[in-house]
Image: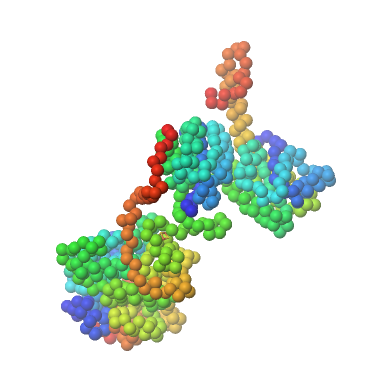
Amino acid sequence: MAEFEPKVVAFCCHYCAYSAADLAGSLRLEYPANVRIVKLMCTGRVDASHLLKAFEAGADAVLVAGCEEGDCHFREGNIKAKRRVGYARKLLREAGLEGERLEMFNLGASDAHKFAAAVNEMTERARKLGPNPLRISREHRAKSIEQRAKRTRAPGTRAPEKPNERS
Amino acid sequence: MIVAERKPFTEIKEMLSGYRKILILGCGTCVSVCMAGGEKEVEILASQIRMAFEKENREIEIKEATIQRQCDREFIETIRKMAGEYEAVLSLACGAGVQFVAELLAPLLILPGLNTRFIGVAEAEGVWSERCRACGDCVLSETAGICPVTICAKSLLNGPCGGTRDGKCEVDKDKDCAWTLIYRRLQEGGKLEKMRKIHPPKKHGVRIYPQRQVNEEFKKEVKSEK
Amino acid sequence: MSKKTFQEALSSGKFVVTTEVGPPKGTNIERLLSAIDLLKDRVDGINVTDNQSSVMRVSSLAICHLVQEKGGEAILQQTCRDRNRMALESELLGANVLGIHNLLCLTGDHLSAGDHQDAQPVFDLDSVQLIQIAKMMEAGKDSAGNELKGAVKFCVGATVNPGANPLEPQLLKFEKKIAAGAQFFQTQAVYDVEGFARFMKQVEGFKVPILAGVIPLKSPGMAKYMNENVAGVSVPDRLIEEMTKAENKEAKGIEIAARLIKDLKGVCPGVHIMAIGWEEKVPEILSQAGIG
Ligand code: SF4
Ligand code: SF4
């Protein structure tokens, strides 16, 4: 598999993980630039459907980062999140994606290094696993449509603006 | 409430083979509460199906919708037109809901996404347990509010079997013996004499399937707007 | 002895002995037949179990018939697990026309313990209701109230577990069984005669004969297994020790069983020996106990 730059989505809670991410930025710590951060008041807001949708949208790895256990500002939002992450992993596997692409992390507001390490770890995992299989099949489909379009196009006509996937 | 669980994903996937445009229909009552077929579960299942199909390069268009109750005509009517645009409806209701949707939207094909399990209670967060087998001849007044038909593995009406051990059931060491529970509660309430009464065999004649109940005062002819 | 019916034996005032045989799983019945031959003249009744332990076997009724043919006195066991009331009633009629007039009504073990775990458990009736129905049929009516052309006649028995914990609900059910018409009881295995004597004291007021269950021990392991797994059975440590020390376990098992029977003679009007595979040793146990 060719080297690729994994897309990582990080669901971060406002109080700890997001502050840590912010700090990591100010400290100019090294972590992959293509992490997309989704800020939540608390990881307790994370639902399995959000996590699945991130993968549906093409994420190669997703992490949920909340406060340390016992330090949640909403008492046990992070504990609930951990269980939901476990549940979402099961759902992912059922759908044919690797559960390892999803992970929960706990860190404090000043744990900038820990945040960077978490993002690095998920990027590494995605590299090992390869791109999100949905992306692969999407590209594959797009290519074959293009080829088919080329083959069937009469000389002088334009490629259809929107490939008709059903053809 | 009716407690159900989602069918295994592989079974659902199998059921959907051959369809390209489906409606996943949730039910907002019992199965929402037991987290098997409500709005959220519709969302999750739709997402899973889209991913699984896309990974295999199969196409599918999914519409997600949830109505308050699939066992009630008036709610089903609200989706009649919309449902007509789909090849099949994957219903996340209990078996009764699935059938009623199928009946009202016939000949549209309705597929069941859940396995319907029992009438029960939400014992704790994430835990449901069976409490009533709808026997049609309730004896709870005689048994301290504990149903021997459901809680006793043998549905015994006249006291414990010989297999009960230290208050646990013969069938499962971790399950309380219904009759020990009944005995204790009757005793605490000073009503132990209830255990002396011989209960006659159940009248199963009252349970010829399918059962029907009519309340004349409220009966009104219904017409569906086909 | 075999000329007397079981019911006559019960009311004769003598120490009553019953035993039981388990039908085989399959059609090879030679071993069973020879066991019946050995037992029929030594006991007052032979119980034939009904798919015991929820394992599918030859029907109790068929084997009861063979017992009778050989001149023995059969006691038909019927559980509520596999037949609804209609099937049970028809079985009772069948037993009577074959000359079988003794019946033991049981709830039956749950299917989850046996070899047909996916079958539908029936439990349309419970043991109390089955006793009641047998008595209704004696009065000439089936459970639905329809007239029978020819009533049945049964000596109806039931079981009681003196070691049950808690005991009181068990006793309440015992009373109901008597109210329903039970004429005799056979108990779960007894090893602690003193404890059993206390139980007998408690139920003194009921004038229904209770036959104490006796299961010969085959090994210390068997005793431990029963202590852990069989409801209401507790083999005292001293007996386990006796078994452990014994060189000849078989002889020891027979000796202990015989001793139990002797001790029980003063406590209850009879015993029910469940040999579980040791049927051919029952005559020896009885001889050592001074019976027959
Ligand atoms: S007796 Fe049990 S099964 Fe029958 S209606 Fe009452 S609760 Fe339900
Ligand atoms: S042990 Fe209790 S709950 Fe279990 S089957 Fe026997 S009577 Fe019923």
Q: State left or right for residue B216 relative to residue C63.
A: right
Residue B222, above or below B170: above
Query: Residue shown at 24%/80% (left/top)?
Result: C10
Q: Where A23 sits versus A143, above or below? A: below
Q: How is the image coloured?
A: rainbow
Between A10 and C248, the one nearer to me in the picture: A10
x and y, in percent, of residue B150 in the image: 42, 61
Does B95 sit above or below residue B129?
above
**Looking at the image, which residue sits at the far left?**
C149
Q: Quadrant of the N terminus of chain C?
A: bottom left
Name the residue rendered at 56%, 17% in the picture. A152
Which quadrant, please, contains the C terminus of chain C? Answer: bottom left
Image quadrant of residue A79?
bottom right
Any part of residue C7 in sight: yes
Q: Which of A72 and C81 is in front in this view?
A: A72
| Residue C20 figure quarter | bottom left
Q: Is residue B171 visible?
A: no
Picture layout, residue A106 above or below residue C39 = above
Residue extending farthest to the front is B217
Kindly give the residue lying farthest to the bottom in the view shown.
C266
Q: Where is residue A46 in the image (x, y as percent from the top left)?
A: 65, 47
Horizontal and vertical percent for residue B179?
42, 69
The residue nearer to you, when weighing A40 against A56, is: A40
Q: In this view, does C285 lie to the left or right of A123?
A: left
Q: Which residue sits furthest top?
A: A156
Q: Which residue is drawn at 46% across and 44% down?
A: B72
Residue A76 coordinates in the image, percent (x, y): 67, 56
Residue at 20% across, 79% down:
C8
Image label count = 0
